[in-house]
Amino acid sequence: MVENDEIYEELRKNIREFVGRKVEPIAKKMDMQDYFPESVFREMGKMGYLGITVGEEFGGADLGYLGQAVIEEELGYSSPSLALSYGAHSNLTLDNLYRNGNGEQRELFVPKLVSGEWIGSLGLTEPQSGSDALNMKTNALKEGDNYIINGSKTYITNAPYADLFLTYCKTGKEHSAFIILADDEGFSRGRKFDKMGMRGSPTGEIYFQNVKVSEKRLLGRENHGKHIILSGLNSERAILSFIFVGLARRSLEEAIKYSVERKQFGESLYRFEMIQDKLATMYTRYKASKLLAYDSIKHLKNNNVDMKAAAASILYSAQVSEYISRECIQIFGGAGYMHDTGIDRLMRDAILGQIGAGTTEIRKKLISGSLIKDFREGRIID
Ligand SMILES: Cc1cc2nc3c(=O)[nH]c(=O)nc-3n(C[C@H](O)[C@H](O)[C@H](O)COP(=O)(O)OP(=O)(O)OC[C@H]3O[C@@H](n4cnc5c(N)ncnc54)[C@H](O)[C@@H]3O)c2cc1C
């Protein structure tokens, strides 16, 4: 992978142009009609965005997590829900499969996900196990050269459209990861959820009833799924942070523009000190969350197993985007409360930030646990 600032600047320019042309015009429709723009999503494969972390030998762009972060930030600016679906496909599923798959699995599945021919989805959460994710019930039983899988997953991003599901199962007392295809016998989709935000990013249930898969579909080693789950969640937290960095920037820009255009008492809103205070605080928090997010990418790249950088990044960027999008509505006054302006969408989308990829509470638990461990082991906090 080549590290070169110019390459990332070029990538940002290109994704911005793509988002302006293809995503911005449909962002409102996605929200109001819960519309998933399948053709735009698949086009991102042709543009090289879906396989941004994948090596060139499998059709990827090989631009690593920094490239994925830039794409998430720019998608998040225009459509956080498309950014969420992108993250579920490109990071949670494809990058995970690429990192942990053997040669044959990479050859069989990676190019299809890179090109957008297939849509990917990751199944961890179950009805009884959300935050307590390792307490899943879905299980895979070894039978000769095959595994028989039974169970279900819920709140799964892209599930209503996906062709491939990276699925975590119990194998005895341990965990293992499997590749399950939508046309495997015994696989079925349940309902698609109607959500308060992130509309247009399809979320659904999936079921496995005696799904028989060859042992060739086991990702990594049997009983070593816990490492795949935890390292995947770490990468997911760092990358999804950028959705909320982009969302915060959009909210701030909308607020600045409106405060210049809107006049009350014969003055533009920005002339009032209380509005100036809001804008300054919004900018400062936005900037801090962005710096924290880019810092978490450095930790990912160094293959750092310490999970606090990514947890802190998404903890803060999610809270900040919620705060800034709320302040944006306040600056818009009544207009911000109307669907017409589309400002309400930013706040509804921001709320997912504190729930998905492990909740705010779980992130705090992880960070504090890691701090105590550092203290006990005599490490300096960086
Ligand atoms: C739009 C959307 C998309 C999603 N996409 C996916 C996906 O693609 N794949 C996937 O596998 N999952 C996905 N999820 C699921 C998501 O990861 C879970 O919703 C999340 O982990 C929380 O689990 P839960 O909803 O069961 O809440 P619960 O775990 O039931 O938590 C309820 C509340 O209790 C708190 N809580 C729980 N345990 C503790 C504790 N020990 N200490 C303090 N507080 C605690 C939580 O923080 C929360 O506030 C998605 C969810 C949403 C809403």
Image (cartoon, grey):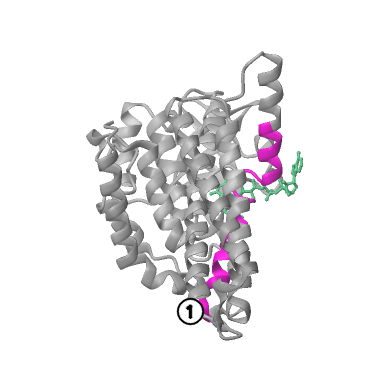
Q: Residues within 10 Å of mark 1 (few under 14, many from 20)?
A: few
Q: Which residue is pictured at 56% across the width and 41% down the height?
A: 313
* Image position, residue 102 (x, y; %): 36, 26
Depth check: give the residue in front, 92 or 265.
265
Residue reaching furthest to the top: 378
Quarter holding the N terminus? top left
Q: What residue sits right under mark 1 in the picture?
A: 261
Give the residue drawn at x 36%, y 58%. 41
Q: Residue at x 66, y 26 (%)?
A: 370
Q: Amino acid at mark 1?
A: Glu
Q: Is residue 257 magenta?
A: no
User: Which residue is at a point 63% across and 43% down the rendered structure image?
Assistant: 358
- Position of residue 362 in the picture relative to residue 253 (left or right): right
Image-based side of 295 in relation to 317, left or right: left
Q: Is residue 120 above or below residue 99?
A: below
Q: Position of residue 190 (x, y in %)?
A: 57, 58
> Secondary structure under badge 1?
helix
Was residue 347 drawn as part of the magenta stretch in this picture? yes
Residues drawn in magenta: 340-367
The answer, for residue 128, to whether it is visible in the render is yes
